Image (cartoon, grey):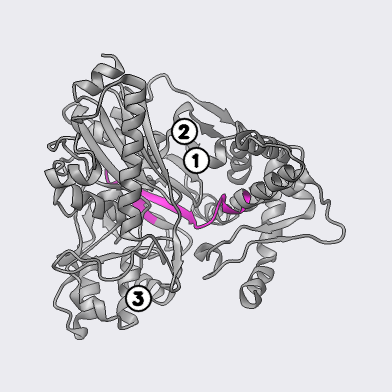
Amino acid sequence: MSARDTIAAGKAVLGIELGSTRIKAVLTDENNTPIAQGNHEWENRYENGIWTYSLEDVWTGLQDCYRDLAADVEKQYGVKIEKLAAIGFSAMMHGYMAFNAAGELLVPFRTWRNTITGPAAAELTALFDFNIPQRWSIAHLYQAILNKEEHVKDIAFLTTLAGYLHWKMTGRKVLGVGEASGMFPIDSSICSFDTGMIAKFNEKIAPLGFPWKLEDILPTVLTAGDAAGELTEEGAKLLDVSGVLQAGSPMCPPEGDAGTGMAATNSVAKRTGNVSAGTSVFAMVVLEKPLAKVHEELDLVTTPDGAAVAMVHGNNCTSDINAWVGLFREFAECYGIRTDMNRLYGTLFNKALEGDKDCGGLLAYNYFSGEPVTGFEEGRPLFVRTPDSRFNLANFMRVNLYSALGVLKTGLDILLKEEGVQVDSITGHGGFFKTKGVGQRMLAAAMNAPVTVMETAGEGGAWGIALLASYMIHRAEGESLADWLNRSVFAGQSGSTEAADPEDVAGFDAFIARYSRGFAIEHAAVENL
């Protein structure tokens, strides 16, 4: 069928992901090829010491994104979206959305970006003998308990942003297992929350007398392929304010941006991995066996079908690069030069390839917010040099690209060198890789491994959740997610692969040694700026 006929017949699949700076919708045909998209730009707010998005921002942003998608469909194909074959919602993982029995949000949404749960994360890591990062939902819940916050006693439901949207669209309080693994530890043998750890948590808080137990307030966990409800009349009106979209479309389990990144890069099989690099940066490696010990620098989450995954997460990646590129644009405009941003990014990124392998002795920290992996509860963006550093544009751009991967490199060295985890393939996706070959080469140097970027890498998580929705309705009986992706989506796709250059690897190692030694500078900046 043509794209127009697919949409008119109600056979298109919709995926929507709410990322940190952009809400994106992707519509796919029966071959899982994107045929239309919509976008909405947004930003988190820092209010009363909390990184947050208001519910008003969530809904106006989502509706504007869908409106943009519908307009793209009408412009391209001259039809309206009346019915969909399947729908999937995704969003940035983790964080804290607590609701009372009336369905009211008890405190403003606390996003993954907050580093305010250090005491709770440390206590729970010791209690479970399992690393609990600060951004996980259970860390936020326990920190609220430690803080004696009044709202805790009234919690009836705890979920994530993706879970909240799915609940409002279907009436069902569920999560995909990958998203759930960022709330509370998962037992991969049952693809659900670890019952032993739930019992330990309940025992720990029992003396406080809350009217709920943890299992009562968590969502039900589903795996990829499970039916997760249908779009209700109320949900259809919330999504499409024009009233054209009909109810009844089946919906897949809501997933986080980590899970959709794995689907979009064909990285759900064991010994595969992917790196997502945008506002934040994270690497996911699907494990063959459990890690030898607990590492606070490594998170243990799951694929959308429940396999164990080691994750290295950095809160900051491209924000500081974007700020510097904006400064260069402003400089150009002072001379009356109108700048195309894609060309400016490409020019500056490619300039980095001309720099010294070790960045000429320059040092940068891209910490807009805290970085638990390297021991920072807060961050201050910094650029530092010595009198004899080789300060030029090429080295300046190279050090900022290296810095964007600094936290990732710190965690990956533990995973790949200390734990000896084997990876057959790494796929990169996200804005960091948009300039062909540059970010890819930097990551290859950081990991000392080949890095592949596919033609579809730019489609991102919205396409990834559309794939998971498509898997739910199109898979063969008993077909695994990995097999379905290989057969139906990625057959014949190879992408471009950049091998690690030994001189680049040595240069990155020299930089990361300087980066680690310089933490005292960053600490001083946090304390004094």
Res. 457 mark:
2
Which quadrant of the structure image shows residue 406?
A: bottom right
The image shows residue 213, relative to residue 223, as above or below, that is: below
Say which residue appears at 19% left-offset and 44% top-offset. 237
**Residue 319 belongs to magenta span:** yes
Marking on residue 430: 1
Whether residue 486 can be seen here: no
Residue appearing at x 19%, y 35% in the figure:
245
Q: Nearer the viewer, residue 326 or 467?
A: 326
Q: Residue 201 location in percent, x, y?
A: 25, 73
- SS state under label 1: loop
Kind of residue indicated by mark 2? Ala
Of pointers 1 and 3, the one earlier in the residue sequence: 3
Q: Which residues are magenta?
A: 300-321
Specify the label residue 239 is tagged with: none
Mark 1, residues whose alpha carbon is within 10 Å: few (<14), some, or many (≥20)? many
* Residue 130 falls inside the magenta stretch: no
Q: Nearer the viewer, residue 236 or 165?
A: 236
In space, the residues marked 1 and 3 are separated at their CA atoms by 32 Å
Q: Amino acid at mark 1?
A: Gly
Residue 528 visible in the displayed image: yes
